[in-house]
Amino acid sequence: MLSRVGRLARLLERARRQAFSRSKLEAWEFDVLAALRRAGSPFQLSPKALLQQTLVSSGTMTNRIDKLVETGLVRRRDDPNDGRGVLVEMTATGLTRVDAAITRLIDAEAAILAGLTKTEQRKLAESLRRLSLDLGEVSGDD
């Protein structure tokens, strides 16, 4: 059974990469932009908040922000609430790309799950949620 889960994980990862590629994004770019998207309008977070949401080192996050600024997907701006602070804000181009990637991911998920009834999909989601929680408890992850 676990080998089937592994094969499914590889297929899902391939679908994820294709959705990002068609949206002209790398997986790491999507992770940062999706975190900004989840923050809601005006789609901005501090570098520290991005770091916490994407689980990368501060050096890695700085590098990622630099690259996203270079490609015009985000911009840095002064934090009006902290004279020394900076906020990372998603640009209109970044928002367009992340929204396209999210739509493609949803479409890919729907295609993958199309062979299951709504009841089967609900049972699968419940079982996966329970396994994830159990594994999180065993490994000590949140």
Image (cartoon, helix red, strand yellow):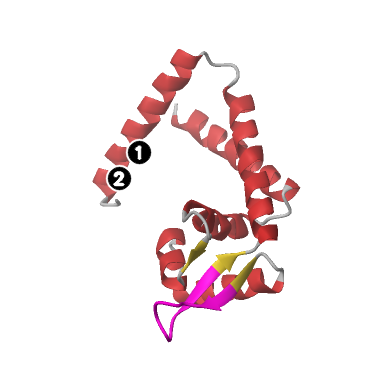
Q: Secondary structure at mark 2?
A: helix
Q: Amino acid at mark 2?
A: Gly
For disc 2, the neighbor class at 10 Å (few under 14, some 14 to 19, many from 20) is few
**Residue 8 falls in which quadrant of the image?**
top right
Q: Secondary structure at mark 1?
A: helix
User: At 43% across and 59% down in the image, what residue appears?
Assistant: 53
Q: Residue 70, image x and y in percent?
A: 70, 74
**Residue 116 falls in which quadrant of the image?**
top right
User: In the figure, 2 relative to 98: above or below?
Assistant: above
User: At 25% across and 44% down in the image, what residue appears?
Assistant: 137
User: In the figure, 48 relative to 125: above or below?
Assistant: below
User: At 35% across and 38% down in the image, what residue appears?
Assistant: 132
The residues bearing labels 2 and 1 have C-alpha atoms spaced at a distance of 6 Å
Q: Residue 2, image x and y in percent?
A: 44, 31
Q: Residue 15, image x and y in percent?
A: 65, 39
User: For the N terminus, which image quadrant?
Assistant: top left
Q: Is residue 84 magenta?
A: yes
User: In the figure, 124 relative to 60: above or below?
Assistant: above
User: At 58% across and 72% down in the image, what residue appears?
Assistant: 65
Q: Is residue 124 magenta?
A: no
Asked whether the residues under the numbered discs 2 and 1 touch, taking CB atoms below 8 Å apart as contact, a structural biologist would say yes
For disc 1, the neighbor class at 10 Å (few under 14, some 14 to 19, many from 20) is few
Q: Report the magenta residues as a range.
A: 76-88
Disc number for residue 136:
2
Q: Residue 50, image x and y in percent?
A: 46, 65
Residue where numbered disc 1 is placed: 132
Q: Is residue 41 left or right of residue 71?
A: left
**Residue 128 falls in which quadrant of the image?**
top left
Residue furthest to the front? 80
Instruction: Pick the residue in front: 88 or 21.
Output: 88
Residue furthest to the bottom? 84
Q: Amino acid at mark 1?
A: Ser
